[in-house]
Image (cartoon, rainbow, N blue to C red):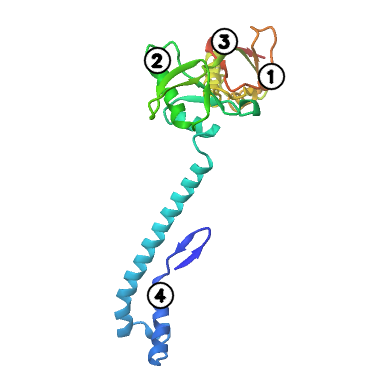
């Protein structure tokens, strides 16, 4: 069975194995069979059934190795990204259908972890949800790392001690959006209604933007979304329209633009 670093073990073909049998047969008994003359002999027929079984075993062995190799790759990836890392914590929350963000560590925050979770604090079952979130933090952080935040749950550890686990709710920023589309002089396609355009913009934002991410206006709408336009411009305002920005909004881990359909204005130029 051959081995390659990229593909692992490769089973030998029946023809290759039968050639080895013929070579050894010639060496052992002083015969001078070739592949053509060996074919159809009694020895060929006797060994062929055995070689079929050996080759089937090689195929199974190669499949087992491939699965083992895949398992080792997955395990190594988990080792490189444990739950206590920022991406690992985010993934731990995603596994329970929570959107979370974790503050990037700095020297001043040694021994602390800051987690923000996008959840509805007005919901009737919020106390249960809060406990669920803090339990994920408990299960995903190592001893000695203290969680920080305003949303606190006292959880009893396996040693019987009660400990506070905490997280923050998003700092929701009210934002106005202004989308300007310039009609192409070459347009020959249907122009969507303003409401349809605004809904498409909102859908794009909901799919591409989330808690803790920078708000990048150029990512959420383009001429591909409005083929009747020669150019589009998306602006945002966080001061009730006093100033309009097109630059990327550099967000902290707990900042979230509160994007609402009623706060989107469409300008057709």
Q: CA–CA distance between discs 1 and 2?
A: 39 Å
Q: Residues within 10 Å of mark 3 (few under 14, many from 20)?
A: some
Nearer to us in this view, 234 or 145: 145
Q: CA–CA distance between discs 4 and 2?
A: 68 Å
Q: CA–CA distance between discs 4 and 1?
A: 68 Å
Residue occupied by mark 1: 246
Q: Of the residues under marks 4 and 2, which one precedes in the sequence? A: 4
Q: CA–CA distance between discs 2 and 3?
A: 31 Å
Nearer to us in this view, 88 or 110: 110
Q: Is residue 236 left or right of residue 22?
A: right
Residue occupied by mark 4: 17
Residue occupied by mark 2: 127
For the question of whether residue 152 can be seen, the reply is yes
Image x and y of residue 126, in percent: 40, 14
Q: CA–CA distance between discs 3 and 1?
A: 16 Å
- SS of the residue under disc 2: helix
- SS of the residue under disc 3: helix
Image quarter (top left, top right, bottom left or bottom right) of the C terminus: top right
Instruction: Farthest residue to the bottom: give it.
Output: 30
Q: Of the residues under marks 3 and 4, which one precedes in the sequence? A: 4
Q: Are marks 2 and 3 in contact (CB under 8 Å)?
A: no
Q: Residues within 10 Å of mark 4 (few under 14, many from 20)?
A: some
Q: CA–CA distance between discs 3 and 4?
A: 73 Å
In this rendering, the count of numbered labels is 4
Q: Are marks 1 and 2 in contact (CB under 8 Å)?
A: no
Residue occupied by mark 3: 263
Q: At 50% across and 21% down in the image, what residue appears? A: 117
- The label nearer to you, 2 versus 3, is 2
Q: At 32% across and 84% down in the image, what residue appears? A: 43
For the question of whether residue 229 can be seen, the reply is no
Image x and y of residue 197, in percent: 55, 18
């Amino acid at each position: 069975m051959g081995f390659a670093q990229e593909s692992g073990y490769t089973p030998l073909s029946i023809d290759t194995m039968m050639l080895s049998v013929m070579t050894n047969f010639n060496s052992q008994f002083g015969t001078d069979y070739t592949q053509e003359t060996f074919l159809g002999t009694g020895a060929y027929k006797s060994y062929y059934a055995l070689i079929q079984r050996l080759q089937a075993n090689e195929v199974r062995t190669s499949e087992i190795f491939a699965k083992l190799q895949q398992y080792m790759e997955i395990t190594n990836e988990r080792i490189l990204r444990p739950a206590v890392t920022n991406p690992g914590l985010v993934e731990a929350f995603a596994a329970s259908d929570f959107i979370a963000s974790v503050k990037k560590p700095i020297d001043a925050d040694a021994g602390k972890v800051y987690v923000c979770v996008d959840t509805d604090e007005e919901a009737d079952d919020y106390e249960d949800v809060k406990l669920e979130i803090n339990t994920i933090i408990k299960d995903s952080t190592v001893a000695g790392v203290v969680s920080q935040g305003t949303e606190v749950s006292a959880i009893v550890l396996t040693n019987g001690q009660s400990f506070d686990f905490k997280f923050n709710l998003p700092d929701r920023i009210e934002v106005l959006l202004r989308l300007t589309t310039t009609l192409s002089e070459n347009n020959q396609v249907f122009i969507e209604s303003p409401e349809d355009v605004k809904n498409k913009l909102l859908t794009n934002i909901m799919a591409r933007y989330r808690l803790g991410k920078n708000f990048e206006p150029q990512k959420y709408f383009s001429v591909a979304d409005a083929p009747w336009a020669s150019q589009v411009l998306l602006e945002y305002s966080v001061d009730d329209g006093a100033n309009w920005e097109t630059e990327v909004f550099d967000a902290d881990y707990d900042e979230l633009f509160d994007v609402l359909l009623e706060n989107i204005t469409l300008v057709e130029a």
